[in-house]
């Protein structure tokens, strides 16, 4: 199974809502990533988890709160978002944090299309 | 910050023609990867080329790497309408803290 599954596929939320995005992989990967992608732009890295510990936070506002409950799951908790946070949120995984540099690929989910109203 | 910069930004060709996309990067790399994205959905890995390789093939894909010029090219031969997508080059930073950084991307349209 080389799949990264993200739920939900679409999410509309108000600025006062709290919601969560979920990501799951069963490839035994120990690094998981959250990316944000605006229309016609490349994905931008938000967070990296390595062995269930947060290893990189790319100065993301605290209204985004990541969580890695176990090696297969990655959540992104959303609270008090702004309309400019509307984007495609992509989850990805790789064998481990250093494996991309050594020549392995990242596997991406299909993303969650988030609209903040 | 973006590591890779692709050109052209948009490319429109007829089915059956070849499509060539270029990518330049700034820092030293161990490998360079190309990904494809259909209609704003997930990215799919296409091909990886290591820094000690100059050329690599996979089906209708051919990728080249010139580390002296810090550039790579992706050639799709005999294009099909189904190749219509956005294509990104991506470079992982070396070392334990590796993370993928994507270029701006190229939008390829293949006309039937």
Image (cartoon, helix red, strand yellow):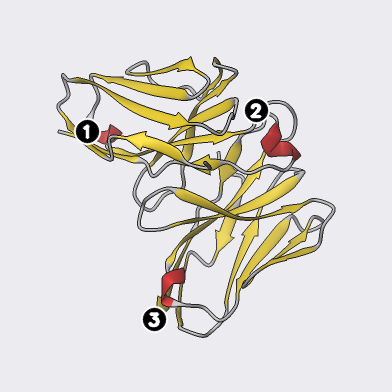
Residue that carries the numbered disc 1 in the rendered image: A83
Residue that carries the numbered disc 2 in the rendered image: A97
> How dense is the environment of label 2, judged by Cα within 10 Å: few (below 14), some, or many (20 and up)?
many
Residue B34 left/right relative to A43: right
Alpha carbon separation for disc pair 3 and 2:
40 Å
Secondary structure under tag 2 reads: loop
Please tell me whether mark 1 or mark 2 is closer to you in this view.
Answer: 2
Alpha carbon separation for disc pair 1 and 3:
35 Å
- Count of residue discs: 3
Secondary structure under tag 1 reads: helix
How far across and down, in percent of the image, does residue B93 sit? 68, 36
Residue that carries the numbered disc 3 in the rendered image: B111
Q: Are marks 1 and 2 on the same chain?
A: yes
Nearer to the camera, B62 or A70: A70
User: CB under 8 Å between callouts 1 and 3?
Assistant: no
Q: Chain of mark 3?
A: B
Q: Chain of mark 1?
A: A
Query: Residue at the spot x=46%, y=43% of the render?
Result: A43
Residue B25: mark in rendering = none
Residue B14 shows in this picture: yes
| Quadrant in the rendering for residue A85 | top left
Nearer to the camera, A103 or B74: A103
Query: Residue at the spot x=54%, y=34% of the render?
Result: A93
User: CB under 8 Å between callouts 3 and 2?
Assistant: no
Please tell me whether mark 1 or mark 3 is closer to you in this view.
Answer: 3
- Which numbered disc, 1 or 2, marks the residue that appears first in the sequence? 1
Query: Residue at the spot x=14%, y=27% of the render?
Result: A14
A94 in relation to A65, above or below: below
Residue A47 left/right relative to B67: left
How far across and down, in percent of the image, does residue A24 sit? 43, 30
| Quadrant in the rendering for residue B76 | bottom right
């Amino acid at each position: 199974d080389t799949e990264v599954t993200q739920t939900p596929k679409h999410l509309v939320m108000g600025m006062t809502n709290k919601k969560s995005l979920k990501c799951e992989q069963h490839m035994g990967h120990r690094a998981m990533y959250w990316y944000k992608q605006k229309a016609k732009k490349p994905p931008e890295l938000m967070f990296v988890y390595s062995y269930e510990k947060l290893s990189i936070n790319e100065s993301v506002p605290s209204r985004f709160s990541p969580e890695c409950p176990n090696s297969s799951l990655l959540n992104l908790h959303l609270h008090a978002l702004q309309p400019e946070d509307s984007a495609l949120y992509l989850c990805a995984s790789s064998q481990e944090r250093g494996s991309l540099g050594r020549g392995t690929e990242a596997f991406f989910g299909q993303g969650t299309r988030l609209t903040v109203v | 910050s973006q590591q890779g910069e692709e050109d052209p930004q948009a490319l429109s060709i007829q089915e059956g023609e070849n499509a060539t996309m270029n990518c330049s990067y700034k820092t030293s790399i161990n490998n360079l990867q190309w990904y494809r994205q259909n209609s704003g959905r997930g990215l799919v890995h296409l091909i990886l080329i290591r820094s000690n390789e100059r050329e690599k093939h996979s089906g209708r894909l051919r990728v080249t790497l010139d580390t002296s010029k810090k550039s790579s090219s992706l050639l799709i031969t005999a294009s099909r309408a189904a190749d219509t997508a956005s294509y990104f080059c991506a470079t992982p930073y070396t070392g334990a803290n590796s993370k993928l950084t994507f270029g701006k991307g190229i939008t390829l349209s293949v006309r039937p």
